[in-house]
Image (spheres, grey):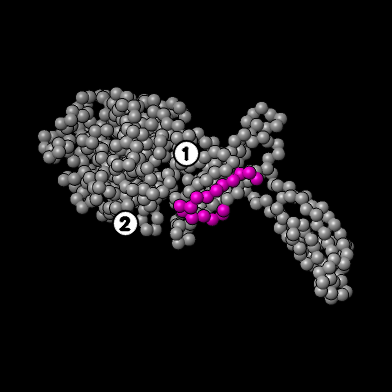
Amino acid sequence: MNTGKPYRLICSLVFSVLSGFSGAQENYVVERLPFSSRIFNDFAPVYYGNGIVFCSDRRTGIFQGYVANENNEAQSELFFVSRTDKSEWGKPQYFDETLRSLKFEGPATFSPDGKQIYFTRNYDAGEKKKRKKGNPNYGIFISSLENGHWTTPEPFPYNNPEHKIGHPCLSPDGTKLYFASDEAGGFGGSDLYVCYLENGQWGRPRNLGPIINGPFHEMFPYVHSSGRLYFTSDRPGGAGQLDIYFTVPVKTGWLPPICLPAPFNSPDDDFSFIAREDLSSGYFTSSRSRTDNIFEFRSVLPRLDSCKEVEENRFTYEIFEPGTRDLDTLTYEYEWDLDQGVIMRGRVVEHTFTPGDYLLKLNVVDTLTGAIMANVATYPLHIEKLEQVHIAAPDTVYTGEEILFNGEDTYLPEMIIDEYYWNFGDGTGTTGIEARHVFLVPGVYRVQLIVESRATHAENRVRVCGMKKIVVLYNSGEVLP
């Protein structure tokens, strides 16, 4: 990735928390998309309709061979490609003729309803007047979809021809606009900023601060529906020159950014990450195939849309002997021996049992001496586990705390379990009857345990799922919205 291109701002931080993609190399597969050429550069995908919009310098049409800077680099333009099914893609086409120009069209973002596009464009690409370092500046431009056509792009109100402002990303609700800029007063070569929508207008840009921005370059922001902020940085300590990081908002600002592990980051340039809501799949750009190409990642862990909530293996009984009557003496009393050292006084008692075998005894005892005067009744009690996938874990935990999950109390007598798959509700997962996990963001998580088995009397593999809600609290003990 050449840092001279105006649509790539070269955008490092110390991080101290475990990656949210633990075990990523085993749990995710990465493949270059079939339409992404090894000859040209394809990068910065964004979801749109039934496909993606992306940037490319592929040569097509009358603009073939046009260059915009002293590095002899071809211009990039916005393309759209539709996905026809899970493995097939259409042919990339120019996104829209109205938005094409003799300028660099760079990374884009769309409003939640898809009727507005914010994208990066040079101010003066192709002209002789250039910055001291040889690259024209660029800003954010906005176009609206009206009557089926995109309007002439208008400049973002905080564009500054003396600086680079680009890589826009709208939050999922459309009320926040994130972008990268090398505006004066920042922390490094380029910083990440945010504007808030206020009464229909964008408020002034706010620097995201030193937790995210550092002395290097931050760029390509992407806000996931979970609230995570993904971005790219050239800070040291990563896998390559450019690496993908993420952070999460907390009451005090942001948690220290975390570098994604392989296969997301590599010794090459990796940037412009986007993902589906459950983080089961998504796209990013990498130069690991010589040029910049768009890659798809997919989780290999199974996921089920519907899981029955786990019930605790605890059974509460009211215990009494129907043939008994009140005792006439003050010194004698009924006493239940409920086995396993549990003794309860009274003719009628209530107790919660866990699965197992018990021998219940009703005795008459002398309250003064504790001596058993008579055994009135004896009953065996067998309590069987609930037939379900079971998850043993705390109901409430704290961010940064390592939690042990256990599925050994799963009871499915008609199945021989071959494998246990965990989905922690934050896009991460692992395998095994036991699992350890650290939640980084406060909230309520629906943790799934999927067991895969070959039925006793069938050859087909089957999967059964259980779900447990885990409340994750921040330092103050309050769940953040």
Query: Of the residues shown, which amino acid type is indicated by label 1?
Result: Gly
Query: Could you say which is closer to the camera, residue 385 or residue 374?
Result: 374
For the point 40% across and 45% down, the residue is: 224
Q: Is residue 380 above or below residue 454?
A: below
The residue where tag 1 is placed is: 23
For the point 48% across and 48% down, the residue is: 438
Position of 335 compared to 275: left or right?
right
Give the image quarter of residue 367: bottom right
Position of 278 compared to 328: left or right?
left
Residue 197: x and y in percent read: 32, 53
Q: Is residue 200 above or below residue 155?
A: below
Position of 267 compared to 301: left or right?
left
Q: Is residue 399 magenta?
A: yes
Kind of element beneath mark 1:
loop
Q: Is residue 370 visible?
A: yes
Residue 19: x and y in percent read: 42, 44
Q: Is residue 95 visible?
A: no
**Image: magenta residue range:** 394-409
| Badge 1 density bin: few <14, some 14–19, many ≥20, Cα 10 Å | some
Q: Quadrant of the N terminus?
A: top left
Query: Of the residues shown, which amino acid type is indicated by label 2?
Result: Asn
For the point 46% across and 53% down, the residue is: 399
Q: Between tags 1 and 2, which lies in front?
A: 1
Residue 330: x and y in percent read: 84, 76
| Badge 2 density bin: few <14, some 14–19, many ≥20, Cα 10 Å | few
For the point 57% across and 39% down, the residue is: 432
Disc on res. 199: 2
